[in-house]
Image (cartoon, grey):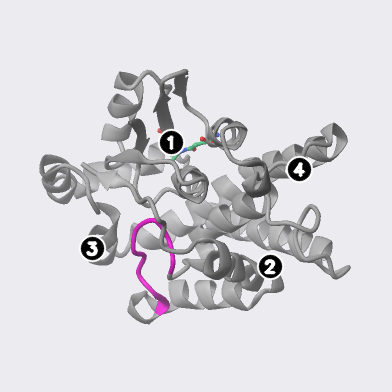
């Protein structure tokens, strides 16, 4: 069976889960907390980031490559990428932009908010991870905060910069949709849509997701205000609509170990 090494809340991991489940591929998820994920990723044969997908063809340590691998094995009518090479190039360019801009900025922005809300973060961060990892991160919370701060290069004021990047990328996506197109790159739901929706999850915090996420009513007021603003943005509304329409309860779900 396919194995997917994850940090359960990670939006890059959500990209991989969504693609696998949409394609009806059975897989076993191996969720880990931040820090331990590096050991797990390496042990599985990947690099230092998750998701890592272990397949009979080899190990894939990048979410965009996982999408491509899954797509090659998906029936034509369900594929995320079209056949036309020029159109595919455009889709890949857009996905790369989202992976490089929206993904890291939205993630760091939300971490800055959530690391101040220890109890709330612990209530959803550790879903499905081994018991010792859950205990370790609770006990060593200050260390975990330092690890994440270092890994993400969090420094005072960085959240203002990240928030500006998030709104810029949301405006960019809303601009694409403004001509009335049903999806980001064509008539059908595709890789750009899945990538945008999954990566926007850091700020729109969808109620439908691979693991349950806390909703604004339990967040600190500045965090709740950020999420509400993202949800009201035309791009945020688009992302929530994609989750509602295309991220249904999977016929084949992950087997969490
Ligand atoms: N380009 C990679 C980025 C993945 C990524 O940044 N994953 C994060 C989790 S959201 C990670 O593992 N970060 C921890 C680290 O860098 O140690 C992909 O798309 O798979």
Q: CA distance from mark 1 to mark 3?
A: 22 Å
Q: Secondary structure at mark 4?
A: helix
**Circle 1 sits on which residue?**
51
Under tag 2, what secondary structure? helix
Find out whether the residues at labels 2 and 4 contact each other: C-beta distance under 8 Å.
no
**Which label's residue is closer to the chain start, 2 or 4?**
4
Q: What residue sits right under mark 4 in the picture?
A: 91
The tag earlier along the polypeptide, 3 or 4, is 4
* Magenta-highlighted residues: 208-216
| 179 is higher (above) or lower (below) than 6 | below
The residue that label 3 is drawn on is 123
Residue 182, picture quadrant: bottom right
Image coords of residue 13 (percent x, y): 44, 44
Q: CA distance from mark 3 to mark 2?
A: 28 Å
User: Is residue 203 shown above or below 76?
Assistant: below
Q: Give the mark nearest the N terminus, 3 or 2.
A: 3
**Residue at x-position 43% and y-position 61%:** 209
Q: How many labels were placed on the picture?
A: 4
Quarter of the image with the N terminus is: top left
Which of the marked residues, 1 or 3, is nearer the chain's N terminus? 1
Ligand 1 has an atom within 8 Å of the beta carbon of the residue at disc 2: no
**Which mark, residue 253?**
none
């Amino acid at each position: 069976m396919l194995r997917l090494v994850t940090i359960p809340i990670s939006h890059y991991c959500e990209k991989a889960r969504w693609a696998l489940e949409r394609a009806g591929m059975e897989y076993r998820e191996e969720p880990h907390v931040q820090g331990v994920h590096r050991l797990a990723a390496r042990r599985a044969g990947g690099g230092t980031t998750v998701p890592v997908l272990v397949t009979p063809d080899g190990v894939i340590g990048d979410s965009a490559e996982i999408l491509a691998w899954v797509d090659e094995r998906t029936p034509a009518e369900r594929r995320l990428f079209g056949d036309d090479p020029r159109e595919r190039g455009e889709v890949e360019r857009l996905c790369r932009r989202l992976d490089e801009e929206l993904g890291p900025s939205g993630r760091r922005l939300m971490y800055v908010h959530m690391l101040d809300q220890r109890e709330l973060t612990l209530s959803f961060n550790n879903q499905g991870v081994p018991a010792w990892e859950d205990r370790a991160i609770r006990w060593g919370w200050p260390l975990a905060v330092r690890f994440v701060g270092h890994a993400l290069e969090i420094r005072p004021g960085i959240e203002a910069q990240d928030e500006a990047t998030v709104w810029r990328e949301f405006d960019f996506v809303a601009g694409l949709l403004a001509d009335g197109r049903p999806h980001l790159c064509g008539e059908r739901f595709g890789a750009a849509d899945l990538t945008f929706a999954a990566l926007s999850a850091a700020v729109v915090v969808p109620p439908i997701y691979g693991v349950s996420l806390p909703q604004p009513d339990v967040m600190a007021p500045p965090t709740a205000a950020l999420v509400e603003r993202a949800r009201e943005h035309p791009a945020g509304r688009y992302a929530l609509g994609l989750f509602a329409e295309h991220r249904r309860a999977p016929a084949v779900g992950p087997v969490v170990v």
